[in-house]
Image: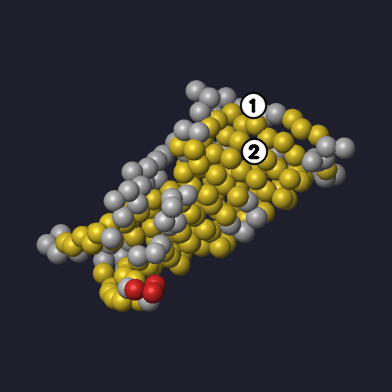
Amino acid sequence: MNNSYSLIIFLPFVILGCAPNVIEENKVIQKIESLNMKIYSKDGDKIYAITSPKSSYNIGELKFELKDPTINIFKGEETKYIINSDISTLSENNKLLKLKGNVKLKTLRAKEDILYADSFIWNIEETNYLLDGNIRFENENIILNSGKAKLGSDNIIEFFNPVKYIIKGGNNENKYEINSENAYYNLNTESVSFNSKDKRVQSIIYF
């Protein structure tokens, strides 16, 4: 028999549904199958949704632990980004989301952009997503690699020094491969800019 229930937390609040739950003997860990949870702001705006085939809730720490999660981040009623990873935790009254292992963030644009990382951190009270470890951004025009990146609400991805970027040529072949300091990719204008530490050397490439 399937059960569904709602859990409301004021800032923000959550709606989740799941299959039958199992409470462990210590009554601290609540196991949840087929988690489907939506997070809303206090104004009722949808912020993000999480699905996970297997998860648990640590009652003592007030923390969700999720396996193979899929996270949809919304802008209004539309999905802005879809993120997958091996594992994830949701804590701090559902305000702190951390993903680890084979993180893959993609846009829903016609020309799909994909951002890979080892880990992803988002405090929903802030506007930036932080990505760390083996960063790789790729679309049909460019590949950018770095150790750390930050994606802002302005749709600009900042890649931290050192950065290696590859500009693709015809037939999706690599045309140029260059190393640089910080790089910035604008998802709106499909342009990448590069800045040196002394700010005297700057370049912008549009695709």
- Marks 2/1: CA distance? 11 Å
**Residue found at x 62% / y 59%:** 86
The number of callouts visible is: 2
Q: Amino acid at mark 2?
A: Met
**In this rendering, is residue 86 above or below 14?**
below
- x then y, percent, for residue 110: 43, 52
Rendered-image quadrant of the N terminus: top right
Front-lying residue, 27 or 30: 30
Horizontal side of 167 relative to 73 (left or right) equals: left
**Residue found at x 35% / y 65%:** 141
**In this rendering, is residue 62 above or below 134?**
above
**Residue found at x 40% / y 62%:** 139
- x then y, percent, for residue 80: 46, 44
**In this rendering, is residue 199 above or below 78?**
below
Q: Which element is circle 1 on?
A: loop
Horizontal side of 186 relative to 77 (left or right) equals: left
Q: Say how the picture is coloured.
A: secondary structure
**Of the numbered discs in the image, which one, if any, rests on residue 37?**
2
Q: Which element is circle 2 on?
A: strand
Q: Amino acid at mark 1?
A: Ile
Front-lying residue, 165 or 200: 165
Horizontal side of 113 relative to 199 (left or right) equals: right
The answer to whether residue 14 is visible is: yes
Q: Residues within 10 Å of mark 2 (few under 14, many from 20)?
A: some
- x then y, percent, for residue 45: 51, 28
Horizontal side of 61 relative to 125 (left or right) equals: right
Q: Residue placed farthest to the right in the image?
A: 1
What residue does disc 1 label? Answer: 8
